[in-house]
């Protein structure tokens, strides 16, 4: 574990030698000051680079730092960006509201109708921001088609791959220029550290590197160490999350008032798009519950004993949230009837039989 602000060299010549090395080999972990990182952050970046099969991985103090970095590396005043409608609500606020203050226009597209994406393209379009599956409604998109639209129109593309991680989907190999993962979630796995990663291809490396240096976004070495430790069990944890989530989904699919927002039902568009691109599914799912009584749905959530209530996910524990307007954000293409409610479940590492039993007892409150 290497912590640093100042790195002490033996002489001025040694400082210059390190700076020359860093210039020649900018991804090689040659640092002359702690803000650029230490060997501890470099190790994490190298592991993630292998997983992502990409040119380089930048580390940020939170997942949202990577969202910010991806956009501010590429977009300049006067540009336009096209964003998936079901995007993480802070990303929505950043693109729809904050970017406006920099004279950048954001347009949103329907994840299941890519004609709305193609129609939104203008000469000013610089970046397509995808999140897959979409936040809260878990819409799986035709990623290959999005990449080809971006390439054909010479537009940069970025995807938020926090749900699948490169264990299940490798976006840079698919042709995306950048890929975001919130390391706070599955990488850490224990809900006790925050971090983010931004994987890039060679084409955008220089632009992102410049913005990364200027913004001072830096993951601390202690957090990098915890995330590296979490990665040692990423595969066994994700396999277990997947297995348990499938069992829970199987159980819930027996309830006629619940529509599962999880790649579960074989004849659905979502399932086909998931199957086409992913090698597995993680533990986060949505339920669309039909009920004329909102409070009874909230009572169902509140009655769960083994699920915690709180933000974030991807850790060892199961979590539940009733998704109000507050979580959904201001969406254009969300068709939710008055008697339809969204609940999000994260299926943790507990015994799935216990989770199913807990759900069974609480589901009876839904009227
Ligand atoms: C949590 C999350 C983020 C932000 O990550 P933080 O580490 O909480 O900043 C970004 N995108 C998605 C899809 C997320 O779920």
Image (tube, rainbow, N blue to C red):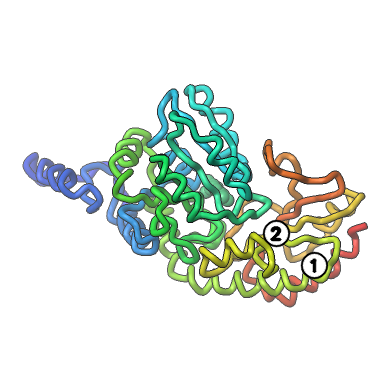
Residue 156 at what x, y percent from top left? Answer: 41, 42
Residue 193 showing in the rendered view: no
Residue closer to the observer: 60 or 340: 340
Q: Residue at x 80, y 73 (%)?
A: 357
Residue closer to the observer: 138 or 94: 138
Residue count near mark 2 (Cα–Cα under 10 Å), binned few <14, some 14–19, many ≥20: many
Please tell me which of labels 1 and 2 falls first in the chain.
Answer: 2
Q: Secondary structure at mark 2?
A: strand
Left or right of 83 on screen, residue 361 = right
Left or right of 128 on screen, residue 267 = right
Q: Is residue 185 above or below residue 333?
A: below
Q: Residue at x 61, y 48 (%)?
A: 111
Residue closer to the observer: 253 or 89: 253
Q: Which of the 4 image quadrants contains residue 17?
A: top left
Residue 366 at what x, y percent from top left? Answer: 89, 58
Q: Secondary structure at mark 1?
A: helix
Per the image, the residue denoted by label 1 is 359
Q: Residue furthest left?
A: 13
Q: Is residue 85 above or below residue 365?
A: above
Q: Residue at x 75, y 58 (%)?
A: 287
Q: Residue at x 48, y 71 (%)?
A: 235
Mark number, residue 80: none
- Tell me the quarter of the image containing the C terminus: bottom right
Residue closer to the observer: 96 or 4: 96
Q: Is residue 50 above or below residue 112?
A: below
Residue 200 at what x, y percent from top left? Answer: 36, 50
Residue 348 at what x, y percent from top left? Answer: 64, 66
- Tell me the quarter of the image containing the N terminus: bottom left
Label 1, label 2: how far apart the Cα atoms are: 16 Å
Residue count near mark 1 (Cα–Cα under 10 Å), binned few <14, some 14–19, many ≥20: many
Per the image, the residue denoted by label 2 is 261
């Amino acid at each position: 574990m290497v912590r640093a602000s100042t790195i002490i060299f033996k002489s001025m010549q040694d400082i210059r030698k390190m700076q020359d090395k860093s210039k020649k080999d900018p991804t090689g972990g040659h640092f002359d000051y702690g803000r650029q990182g230490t060997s501890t952050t470099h190790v994490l970046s190298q592991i993630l680079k292998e997983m992502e099969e990409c040119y380089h991985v930048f580390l940020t103090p939170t997942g949202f730092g990577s969202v910010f970095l991806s956009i501010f590396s590429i977009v300049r005043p006067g540009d336009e960006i096209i964003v998936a409608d079901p995007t993480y609500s802070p990303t929505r606020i950043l693109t729809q509201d904050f970017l406006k203050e920099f004279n950048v226009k954001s347009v949103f597209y329907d994840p299941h109708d890519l004609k709305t994406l193609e129609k939104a393209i203008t000469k000013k379009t610089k970046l397509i921001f995808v999140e897959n599956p979409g936040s809260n409604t878990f819409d799986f998109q035709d990623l290959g088609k999005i990449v080809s639209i971006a390439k054909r129109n010479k537009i940069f593309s970025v995807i938020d791959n926090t749900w699948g991680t490169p264990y299940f989907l490798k976006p840079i190999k698919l042709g995306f220029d950048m890929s975001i993962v919130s390391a706070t979630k599955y990488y850490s796995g224990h809900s006790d550290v925050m971090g983010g990663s931004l994987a890039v291809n060679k084409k955008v490396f220089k632009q992102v590197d410049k913005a990364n240096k200027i913004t001072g976004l830096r993951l601390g070495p202690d957090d990098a160490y915890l995330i590296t430790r979490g990665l040692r069990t990423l595969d066994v944890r994700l396999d277990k999350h997947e297995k348990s989530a499938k069992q829970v989904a199987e159980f819930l699919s027996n309830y006629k008032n619940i529509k599962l927002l999880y790649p579960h039902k074989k004849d659905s568009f979502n399932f086909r798009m998931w199957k086409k691109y992913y090698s597995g599914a993680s533990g986060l799912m949505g339920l669309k519950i039909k009920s004329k009584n909102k409070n009874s749905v909230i009572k169902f959530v509140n009655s769960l004993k083994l699920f915690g209530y709180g933000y974030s996910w991807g850790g060892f524990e199961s979590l539940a949230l009733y998704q109000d307007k507050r979580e959904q954000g201001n969406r254009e293409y969300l068709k939710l009837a008055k008697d339809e409610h969204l609940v999000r479940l994260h299926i943790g590492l507990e015994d799935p039989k216990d989770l199913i039993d807990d759900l069974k007892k609480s589901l009876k409150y839904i009227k």
